[in-house]
Image (tube, coloured by chain):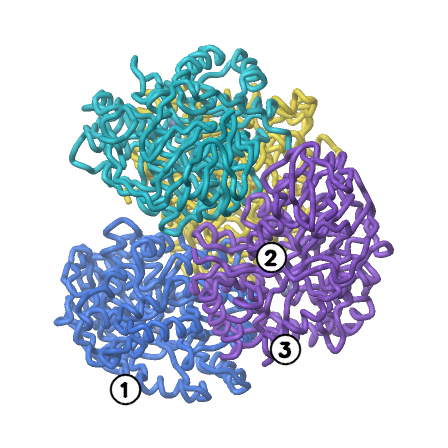
Chain colours: A yellow, B cyan, C purple, D blue
Amino acid sequence: MATKVIKGGTVVTADLTYAADVKIENGTIIEIGPNLSGDETLDATGCYILPGGIDPHTHLEMPFMGTYSADNFDSGTRAALAGGTTMVVDFALPSPNQSLLEALQMWDNKSSMAHCDYSFHMAITWWGEQVFNEMETVVREKGINTFKHFMAYKGALMVQDDEMFASFQRCAELGAMPMVHAENGDVVADLSAKLLAEGNNGPEAHAYSRPTQVEGEATNRAIMIADMAGVPLYVVHTSCEEAHEAIRRARQAGKRVYGEPLIQHLTLDDSEYMNKDWDHAARRVMSPPFRNKQHQDSLWAGLASGSLQVVATDHCAFTTDQKRYGAGDFTKIPNGTGGLEDRMPMLWTYGVNTGRLTMNEFVAVTSTNIAKIMNVYPKKGAVLVGADADLVVWDPEKTKTISASSQQSAIDYNVFEGKTVKGLPRFTLTRGRVALVDGEIKPAQGHGKFVKREPYPAV
Amino acid sequence: MATKVIKGGTVVTADLTYAADVKIENGTIIEIGPNLSGDETLDATGCYILPGGIDPHTHLEMPFMGTYSADNFDSGTRAALAGGTTMVVDFALPSPNQSLLEALQMWDNKSSMAHCDYSFHMAITWWGEQVFNEMETVVREKGINTFKHFMAYKGALMVQDDEMFASFQRCAELGAMPMVHAENGDVVADLSAKLLAEGNNGPEAHAYSRPTQVEGEATNRAIMIADMAGVPLYVVHTSCEEAHEAIRRARQAGKRVYGEPLIQHLTLDDSEYMNKDWDHAARRVMSPPFRNKQHQDSLWAGLASGSLQVVATDHCAFTTDQKRYGAGDFTKIPNGTGGLEDRMPMLWTYGVNTGRLTMNEFVAVTSTNIAKIMNVYPKKGAVLVGADADLVVWDPEKTKTISASSQQSAIDYNVFEGKTVKGLPRFTLTRGRVALVDGEIKPAQGHGKFVKREPYPAV
Amino acid sequence: MATKVIKGGTVVTADLTYAADVKIENGTIIEIGPNLSGDETLDATGCYILPGGIDPHTHLEMPFMGTYSADNFDSGTRAALAGGTTMVVDFALPSPNQSLLEALQMWDNKSSMAHCDYSFHMAITWWGEQVFNEMETVVREKGINTFKHFMAYKGALMVQDDEMFASFQRCAELGAMPMVHAENGDVVADLSAKLLAEGNNGPEAHAYSRPTQVEGEATNRAIMIADMAGVPLYVVHTSCEEAHEAIRRARQAGKRVYGEPLIQHLTLDDSEYMNKDWDHAARRVMSPPFRNKQHQDSLWAGLASGSLQVVATDHCAFTTDQKRYGAGDFTKIPNGTGGLEDRMPMLWTYGVNTGRLTMNEFVAVTSTNIAKIMNVYPKKGAVLVGADADLVVWDPEKTKTISASSQQSAIDYNVFEGKTVKGLPRFTLTRGRVALVDGEIKPAQGHGKFVKREPYPAV
Amino acid sequence: MATKVIKGGTVVTADLTYAADVKIENGTIIEIGPNLSGDETLDATGCYILPGGIDPHTHLEMPFMGTYSADNFDSGTRAALAGGTTMVVDFALPSPNQSLLEALQMWDNKSSMAHCDYSFHMAITWWGEQVFNEMETVVREKGINTFKHFMAYKGALMVQDDEMFASFQRCAELGAMPMVHAENGDVVADLSAKLLAEGNNGPEAHAYSRPTQVEGEATNRAIMIADMAGVPLYVVHTSCEEAHEAIRRARQAGKRVYGEPLIQHLTLDDSEYMNKDWDHAARRVMSPPFRNKQHQDSLWAGLASGSLQVVATDHCAFTTDQKRYGAGDFTKIPNGTGGLEDRMPMLWTYGVNTGRLTMNEFVAVTSTNIAKIMNVYPKKGAVLVGADADLVVWDPEKTKTISASSQQSAIDYNVFEGKTVKGLPRFTLTRGRVALVDGEIKPAQGHGKFVKREPYPAV
Ligand SMILES: [Zn+2]
Ligand SMILES: [Zn+2]
Ligand SMILES: [Zn+2]
Ligand SMILES: [Zn+2]
Ligand SMILES: [Zn+2]
Ligand SMILES: [Zn+2]
Ligand SMILES: [Zn+2]
Ligand SMILES: [Zn+2]
């Protein structure tokens, strides 16, 4: 089979920086070293060769009120590749009383359009003997080792403490890891109702209805429950100091807890909701909402010190039309923003270029740590012989101004519109296939494959 | 009317220590100063004159499985007086769907035997429009400004977060203060079931079923809910560093949160549950259970630094026979221990005599802080002209060895059995009536009156 | 002797609020109760009767480069009385190798002009056998129980760790309490030199030269040294979260440490130093400098939760002319601002009127806590029979706009210029003498007396 | 040149665990993969292949009172290899006013006997223009990028804050990193003198003279000074929660601070000093002294959570005879214990076998993190093609009982005497040379080479 060589670049991994060429065959890295040659050459002069980004948190074609989030596995994975991300982990969300396996089948079907590799987390949205039993199948046969629990979205996805505790213990038995969306759903529901009753129905009320305290509380609670169950815990979209403090406190007591800031929370703040333009504000509605600068500082320090490990997007893109379902009632605004295409350039620009993160830390939090935590390392997240050739040739001098007009995402706006980033992919390779060249996508629907994730070994 | 003078002593209040006589008429202090005389004289030479102790947390004649906790308002308030405590605050506990007012009437009936003054907290054990409405009557007409919420005892007293949040908001409207028994009831229930299933049915399993983490979590959660509701919060029986940490963290963010260590948690530790004698261990079963020495250090430091404000007993005495309901199943052991008679001598001995607390701090945490927090200061908790003559003449040289054989309590054992205390009442006066003379009770059933507690002013 | 009665007001103390008249004779409170009458009546209708304020930290007529701080004991104590403060505690500052007793004599001489009572702290500015010996005389004979240590002002007042440790141990022996000005003087000196060398010579460089970190570090160090010496510690002018955190951490470990925010740090921030007007900025130069809003929030929360106990001024007033000594070299700008007249109205306005502090807490932090910590309670800081009649009749409706044009202070500006306060003294009484009536001072130079402060009892 | 292959083992690095053979030539790893063959084969069946340990903190042949610490570069590096450690970093300690370069030459001379590779830290024991200038030579020419500062050992090695600040700033300019021995030397000196004066002259007084508070304080101070200087900081021998807390607090504010627990502090506690046998206790005298179990828990949690990064020994071995210099005066007991041979087996036994650390974390804290922090990664600390073949073939089933009778160290005792470890090297290779086979050393004096360490890149 034909070989490719990435030549003239500097390999940057989570723990190394060194000049080397990288040779690829059959979708796999077969050699790393000086002076390699192959059938095809990709010029990496002046560039870094990074493991492709992994986004551990996306919602592509997510069902919502009879329709779906606007980016599916086609446009979503195109966006990923355009930004240097070569793998996404999406969430299978069973309906109430729906079989986990049936839900998984639905998500499998959607994913056939994927341009890059992907995996799934399974959500535990209800509890019962069937769920208990199917969890084993999900782990042992379906290659999924993470289970998501929503502590918010009362009346919909939310589970109670006793259900969480039962599920966490089941995870412990199976070698799986629980994840939580941590907000106190009871308090959010009540605050939301009160705000609406008082006539606060605009997007800014969404932020008022989900203060940092409710996230901090739920994070702390989930940590305790995981500790009692004897499992590690992964906290998705950690957005504030209160949640980060709970994670830090747990870690310094020796608990294995991971926190995942989103690129949105790292770089955008709650003043966005004060925008007079309803559309502008509504497009930024997600949960947790954006926070103020002090919370941003806390998140950045967490990434630098290791108390937070991962940067994700929670990419769940809704068009302005879809957002307008919530006109007159903020609780009906679909929750979610885009970010897949922008995560890596934005983090490089605001993290590496500012000195907050080293390049190696950048690789760790966008790829390697995630691969390790998701138990797909070093197949993913590594520049090693034998690893999948999910690679980015990163040009630190390349700049662009982010704009909806030039994005892959199917939606009509971008929450980072107008931000200038410096540091962009020259090439993105997915299992050896060149999917991006200098900003231009080379599509291949269906190229992406499901990545099985084995149960964790007992510690 | 006849007057009494306490002569020759040193008045010790929460903020003053000075030599003075105290003159009493009609149950009230009418004069404080040098060289007073009256119809009757109580010799306080070598003694301190303290405001009588207030125990903010008792359960006298509490219904339990068709019977009642063994100390009723007769023996319970005798025990109180014997130890220098001149007021108790008990809990009216409505059954599911029972009217708050009806429950209050039941407790009113029981209290007719009281030898000293008392008041009530009202428990919110279920939620509905009736409760919402009756809370107003309880506050405005019945003189009760505190509402207790159980976050544990699943299937019985426990309330859910949304109910707590609703009730806390109602408290905010009414100028009342919520209280919480803070343990995660879901986790406790599940751990208990698991322990039983594994054959751990002895009293030590009670301690395993309620680790400090579940208390810390619930404390943190209640604080968040109170913060969202805009009310202060009173956390009963704070027993561990995790809960104390949550309280400290709240207070240093400017929140008004109070923590109440029990004398048991300050002086006894979890090694008691390892006693080979089932009866010994079972008699110590209470919730939260005793903790280890590190947690004790945390509680003492909290009292000294002001992050914890109050020392109580949670006095809820069951006889050995009653405890034996739980033979073979620790979850059936009635929860509760005695302490009313011992709180003040034990705290003096282990707090003041060791230098951990000043005498003024002793008065603060056993009486004055409680009176202020309960909004009955300076009628109670003060040595001031016009205050109720609830007073203790405290002899710092008097010693005894605690023993069930000589106690007022109706039960057949004492968790402090064998401890030698130094510092005991020479006289205890309840509204001017001498109820204790040198260890001998002068009973007067029905002397005790209900103390109305007004709503808190808006802050 | 003629008696005075304050009639129709509400007494507010650190722990009580109640309607009562207050009767005064011979400079002392002789009766508190309803319907009192006397030779003279002061109308307190609509007003609160508070213990007079105590400012534990002033520098009146402080020597500086051959001249003195502009407010002496005449204008300084007039300013105090105008703002409701009836006692100041100043600092005797021995020169290098000067006898403590000789320095004290110098300060005694200055104080003969005082309009209200005062006391002294003694500074330990050098160390040697003479100092060691004279400390005993200072404590046992001179009525001074507090010793100040400067950890900054290198080459002038600063002492080294070994000297501090020796002095703290000496305090422990004598029943005295050490105080610290906590900034790392070595780092400040070096940063200052560097800033000057780089051409940063304006007042804003003063703030850069003393970042919060150097205060936090020194506070933490002083606490450790006090802990090792077995003495409590009083930290003057706690201005930032880092220092406050060190104090909280110590207190929650059971250590007796006190923190003193200044009214300036509570209400003014570091943007003042950015003012284009050199004079404006230079007039605000003090050490520590003003901090940002986050630090202010920390200080306010500390006052509410009890981790900080006292509000002072560090009143050390220099005229604009004096400030101009530092033109072209910020290190030569005399350090200090005014505040004596404004402390209580400003704290009432920004603390009580905003709901951050209760009225009782206001009294505690401006007077009662200080009296207790300084060991002059209840002679000072109390509304009690037998206490000195240092009282303020406080009109919560009275307003004014602060202005240098109407102040008692001798300087030509006021750092609070233009702030409108609501809550001002109607009358201020110093030992029964009415020294302020509705904004008008009734001077009586020399009325003020030295207040002896006894050593602390062993704990 | 002849090649070696390590066959049949599982490579364990800081981030990977995988079966592979490792091929070595000319002291370097030339291939990693399946089915390799070479001139010589080392059987790794059932074993892990780890990067050789690096001990970042030793004192071999350290001058002391006219003699030297008993282990020199001969016996010390033999001990290292026997325990799986293949590189040590020692400290060049200039005498007062001695040239740094001259001191370095002296250490260079000693190191000619080394059996494994080594590097040096340079100590800043005095300050002056010469030191300032020579630091540049040390960094740019001598391959040393770390400078040690002693905050204790008053009158000997100790430097003052202003000297430290100057040196730290110089480090910042040169791309070097400061290190600190963090104890408040003034307080230690005074406490020591007091203990001696009171007749406490035994080894237990050594522990009393250096409480955890003095270490916590100094750590906190050094962190502030590094922050002000804009350099990262490496804190040697972090032994207690107070120091760890200061490090955590710094890291969560985004500062780059590293903490180094010693294997002794992780596994031995202060009860050792209570041993009736003077020799037993004196042999454990080191600074900081051993701490209690709570501090141990803190250190282990730090290694697991990443707030502490490195495990070292501070190996500085004195014979019992040398220890006896301090008979009758604990301050004269030479400070130091052994540990080089035992660090890795002890950490594996108490860390990996107990589940506190994963194998990958073990590699990180004993080797890879150290190599990265010392800037010699991936030459050292890695199992990568091109890396030095410093490797350990680790047999997790191999056990022994530690005993002085069988150790490489020159001293007559071992502080871990009698501990049974499980997990020991089958082979240790230093740059490809097999230096240990199943417990037997194959010596080669002078094989060890100095490892140059480049300045850190600007961040
Ligand atoms: Zn979510
Ligand atoms: Zn999501
Ligand atoms: Zn309870
Ligand atoms: Zn109770
Ligand atoms: Zn000062
Ligand atoms: Zn001052
Ligand atoms: Zn050292
Ligand atoms: Zn050392």
Output the chain of dot 1.
D
Q: Amino acid type of disc 1? A: Thr
**Residue placed furthest toward the left:** D405
Q: Is mark 3 within 8 Å of ligand 6?
A: no
Q: Nearer the viewer, residue A58 or C313?
A: C313
Front residue of A259/A364: it is A259
Specify which label sits upstream in the sequence, 3 or 2.
3
Do badges 3 and 2 share one subunit?
yes
Locate residue B422, reporting x and y percent: 32, 44
The residue nearer to you, when weighing B302 against D446, is: B302
Asked if residue A169 can be seen in this view, the reply is no
Q: Is residue D229 above or below residue C274?
A: below
Label ID, residue D67 = 1
Question: Which numbered marker is on residue C238?
Answer: 2
Of the four image quadrants, the one with ligand 7 is bottom left
Please count the marks in the image.
Answer: 3
> At which x and y percent is residue A430?
47, 45
Please, what is the three-letter code of the amino acid marked with disc 2?
Thr
- Residue that badge 3 annotates: C95
Q: Residues within 10 Å of mark 3 (few under 14, many from 20)?
A: some
Residue D103 quadrant: bottom left
For label 1, being within 8 Å of ligand 8 is answered no
Amino acid type at mark 3: Ser
